[in-house]
Amino acid sequence: MRSTLNRPTPEEMDLSGFRIFKHLTEDEVNRLNYDKTCSVYKKGSVIYREGSRLTGFYCITKGIVKVYKTGIDGKEQIIRFAKKGEIIAYRSLVSNELACTTAKVIDEAVLCHVPYQTLLYLVDNNSKFSLHMLQIVCKELKEANDYITDIAQKTVRERLAEVLILLKSNFELDENQTLQISLTREELANMVGTATESVIRLLSEFKQDKLIELQGRKIKFLDLQGLTKVANL
Amino acid sequence: MRSTLNRPTPEEMDLSGFRIFKHLTEDEVNRLNYDKTCSVYKKGSVIYREGSRLTGFYCITKGIVKVYKTGIDGKEQIIRFAKKGEIIAYRSLVSNELACTTAKVIDEAVLCHVPYQTLLYLVDNNSKFSLHMLQIVCKELKEANDYITDIAQKTVRERLAEVLILLKSNFELDENQTLQISLTREELANMVGTATESVIRLLSEFKQDKLIELQGRKIKFLDLQGLTKVANL
DNA sequence: CGGCCGTTTGAGCTCTGTCAAACTCTGTGG
DNA sequence: CCACAGAGTTTGACAGAGCTCAAACGGCCG
């Protein structure tokens, strides 16, 4: 019993589903599998910390990871939530810098560590891999730029509505239109870039307006169209 | 006389100074030079527009280009100012999307257009080039993430001070500690993400506090340390 | 000269952050 | 089983940062 808690299952160690690894040769796949190290991380545990030296990047095969920067007064700014199929920590790695974000587990997760040398090897030998990497970074850059525009120009109300919609499209709902990812109000505030109290007030306004329904941390979507209108998209 | 206005000089067509092209083979350099198209762009002219299809990316060999997104009510959000030695339009190109920013010339510029096919060819054949590209995108992503944290957590005052410092480190000063790049108050506001009037008021406060000196659009730095303190860096 | 654009200044008001207090829920230790 | 501590949530009151609107001014160009 104990060991099942600490050892990932074979399918949790399988990286073949990752888009970036789609076009590797058999040899490259073998090397990747030989070099990688997969571990289970409990909720709340830190995968890497801001300022630490990274030895590789991580592929998430299970769970949800919060990636955030520490800003003024230690207030955290959430950069993204990464889930199964996504990779983290690659940015600082490629730039050869100390990590400028912290990654913390939100939902019990399994991550496979891929050493820097392996990354370099793949970039060096497989141009399809390079192109995929490039596309992934560019996608994230686009999202970041979009978010800058939003945060600079929209009200907190609009941004919160947008974040909810974003969460809805990134994380599955149950059959009841309820978000499966469970975030504290503070985490929502740290995504939106506002105070916890503001999130609370706005959420209950959304509830009064019959846009959502609240039950503790569970958020159920009632009127996506209305929410989209509030988000001013 | 006319032709010197419309034809770039040989050194304005030279891409050998660009870091990403540093490790090309002779053949690759030849191909690049054959494929590229260099043009002079007058101040105010648009290089590409949001929503248009891009056929390649651009290397800036002279001048300054403003890259911005159009947000709410047509208000522009400036993503970056790109100058000599930098490349633009590569993000949407790599992602194979329509341009999601507009690029407009601030200071008379020369840009060399490099076709998409050439980019693919280089990525495909030269892993050093790929790695450099990757590093450039990652650098921009880091800056974007940093900016998100700033804009979400800092006051307008702090952000404006920071933007001034940023401009100082990215664009040369004359011997008089005066910024050579000339921006309207509105453009400053669109970088900071605030109203034009707020920029005006804060700039005159900075002036009163002897941090800067103003003369039309010219900004002269008097007390960089004080400015840094205001920026809360 | 007139018009246009960018800049400046003032006044008012709203959004949103801060502070404080109470309340819920959970897990712990006695 | 209960009391208690601690974290997260909620609500209220309040202040102030910063946005909007309006008006006036300067410079530049046709």
Image: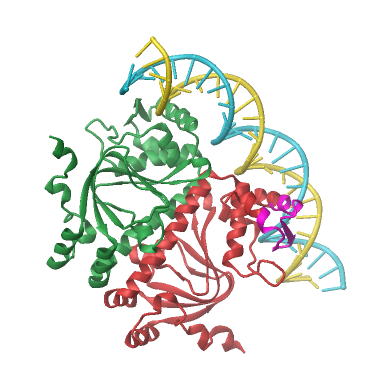
Chain colours: A red, B green, C yellow, D cyan
What's the magenta region?
Answer: A203-226
Give the quadrant of residue B92. Answer: bottom left
Q: Residue at x 52, y 83 (%)?
A: A12
Q: Which residue is drawn at 65% across and 51% down?
A: A199
Give the quadrant of residue B174. Answer: top left
Residue A59 placement (x, y as % from top left): 46, 75
Residue A1 placement (x, y as % from top left): 62, 89
State whether residue C25 is above or below residue D9.
below
Number of marks present in the image shown:
0
Residue B29 placement (x, y as % from top left): 15, 63
User: Left or right of B78: which side holds B112?
Assistant: left
Residue B152 seen by the camera? no
Assess whether residue B214 is covered by the magenta stretch: no
- Of the pair D28 and A191, the residue shown nearer to us: D28
- Of the pair A31 and B133, the residue shown nearer to us: B133
User: Left or right of B212: which side holds A197?
Assistant: right
Q: Residue at x 69, y 67 (%)?
A: A177
Residue A129 seen by the camera? yes
Residue D25 placement (x, y as % from top left): 44, 14
State whether residue B224 is above or below residue D30.
below
User: Left or right of A121: which side holds A138?
Assistant: right
- Of the pair A18 and B214, the residue shown nearer to us: A18
Assess whether residue A222 is covered by the magenta stretch: yes
